[in-house]
Amino acid sequence: MNTLLENFYDNHVFKGVKNEHGEVDEVTFIDCSFNNCSFTETIFRACKFQGCAFTKCDLNLIKVDNSTFTNTTFENSKIVGVNWVKASWGERGMHQLLKSIDFTNCVLNYSTFMGLNLEKVLIKKCTARDVDFSEANLKQADCSFTDFTNTKFRHTDLTETNFRGATNYFIQPQLNTLKKTRFSLPEAISLLYNLDIEIGEAFDEENEENKDTQ
């Protein structure tokens, strides 16, 4: 069912809208807010979102084919199983994402951001399990207090990325760019497990030998 019948919405408030399993083609949303809306499995095709805010929305399994996002925020929303690579990121190219999407307290499980430019993106206090950030640019991103269980970081630029308070990440230093990347204990110890080193209890071998001779 498609309840979005206009081609252009400016400063419009959508509250409690249900547009599940629908198709929304070439609609422009400027400074719109979406509150408690459900768009499960909806296809947003060649749509434009500028200055929009999604709060407490269900966006599971949406498709964002050739849609653009500028200064759009998502808060307390479910956005599971979304392939963000399919969106259009304007003149900067298909595989680049402007500093235009922020996620706070969202569920992003089973989504992919592979190869996107996510520089300075906010992914804070989220659940991001089984997400793919391979070959993405996460420079200066704020990923604090997010659960990254089974999430893939491979050839990812994590320069100055903030992982303080984040949990369950598996980041191989030799396969990613880590420079002034911020972590917190005890989770940061997991970085050592990916290195070819041995970690054990400290003891004085010389003192042990002396004990054996006494």
Image (cartoon, grey):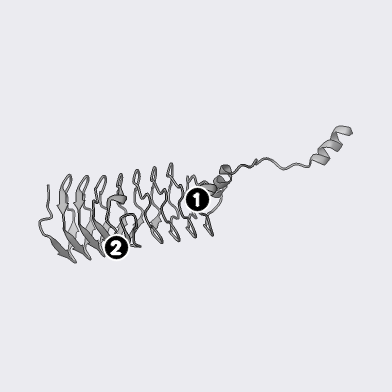
Residue beneath the point at 17% across and 64% down: 12
Q: Is residue 214 left or right of residue 190?
A: right
Q: How many marks?
A: 2
Percent x, y of residue 5: 10, 56
Percent x, y of residue 47: 20, 57
Q: Is residue 45 left or right of residue 112?
A: left
Residue at the extreme left of the image, as rendered: 5
The one nearer the camera, 135 or 145, is 135
Three-letter residue code for mark 2: Glu
Query: Does the rendering let one see residue 206?
Result: yes
Q: Indicate the quadrant where residue 194 lies.
A: top right
Q: Indicate the quadrant where residue 14 lies.
A: bottom left
Q: Could you say whether the residue bearing mark 2 is in a helix, strand or loop?
A: helix
Residue beneath the point at 47% across and 46% down: 169
Disc 1 or 2, which lies upstream in sequence? 2
As measured in the structure, the alpha-carbon distance from the residue carrying label 1 to the one carrying label 2 is: 27 Å
Percent x, y of residue 165: 48, 53
The one nearer the camera, 116 or 61, is 116
The one nearer the camera, 70 or 135, is 135
- Mark 1 or 2, closer to the camera: 2
Q: What's the mark number on residue 84?
A: none
Is residue 210 positioned above or below 88 on the image? above
Task: Check contact, mark 1 vs mark 2: CB within 8 A.
Answer: no
Residue beneath the point at 13% across and 55% down: 4
Three-letter residue code for mark 1: Asn
Q: Could you say whether the residue bearing mark 1 is in a helix, strand or loop?
A: loop
Q: What's the mark number on residue 176?
A: 1
Q: What's the mark number on residue 91?
A: 2
Quarter of the C terminus within the rendering? top right
Q: Residues within 10 Å of mark 1 (few under 14, many from 20)?
A: some
Q: Residues within 10 Å of mark 2 (few under 14, many from 20)?
A: few
